[in-house]
Image (tube, rainbow, N blue to C red):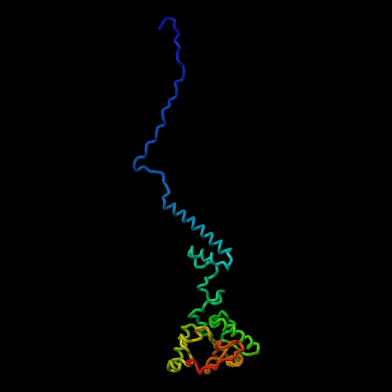
Amino acid sequence: MPTGAVVVMDTRTPPPSFAPVPTPAPPQDGAPRPPRPSARRRRTAVLATAVTVLAVVAALTWAFLPDADRGLRTLVADTLGTEDAGTGAGAAGAEPGAGVAPDLPAQDDPRQEDDTIDPFDDQHPAIAGLDEDLRTALQSAARDAQAAGVDFWVTSGWRSTNYQQSLLDRAVDRYGSLAEARKFVSTPETSEHVQGRAVDIGPTDGADWTIRKGARYGLCQTYANEMWHFELATTPGGTCPQPLPDAAG
């Protein structure tokens, strides 16, 4: 270095290190990994949400949907497997008098044994099971008979096949043979009671009044040996046919 030269020192701060951030090492085999929801759990959560939504829809439907609109009620009930769609016990299992007129009353309804039945009791199986025209004629006659001070009630109306068969069996025991029993009780296959097209009227005064006045309503005594048995055999105000000797013809 020459004599007298000035030495200049570099006093600047050295630049910082720009070494890259080390990459974390991959986890070793067997090391715990962050939990991830399984596909099954995700599907379960979605299904639970859907069921909850359907339940809310069902509740709102049953609370606010008018009774006349039963289509949507049925759809909701079928979807959720609910027996009751908000209208009571359901039309298919409704008993007479539950607000839904059945095609026929129950086969085993014990009230069929009743023998003093109000002709206006449309909930009674003996009355509910009658043909509509016969029931209308019966009730018109009953109204006029009672207004005239005549006791008038139904001793038997619609009958189930089971009940008709039991009556025939009793008649066979009583009269000793099927041929004799058939003069008073028809088989279930031929009985007009089972078809809802016959009615027995009591007491004697009521039956006698109907023999004399029944043609006004179309009611006619069917069998000569049964003053209580009437069928709709003529038009109102018409002429009744001659009664048959008995139920066997």
Nearer to me, 109 or 223: 223
Residue positioned most to the left: 29
Q: Residue at x 41, y 44 (%)?
A: 34
Q: Report the label total.
A: 0
Q: How far from the left and from the top, in percent, is residue 227?
A: 55, 93
In the image, residue 214 above or below residue 55: below
Nearer to me, 150 or 161: 161
Nearer to me, 190 or 154: 190
Residue positioned most to the top: 3
Q: Residue at x 54, y 70 (%)?
A: 88
Q: How far from the left and from the top, in percent, is residue 81?
A: 48, 65
Nearer to me, 30 or 23: 23
Q: Residue at x 45, y 15 (%)?
A: 10
The N terminus appears in which quarter of the rendering? top left
Q: How far from the left and from the top, in percent, is residue 26?
A: 37, 38
Give the quadrant of residue 86: bottom right
Q: How far from the left and from the top, in percent, is residue 122?
A: 57, 80
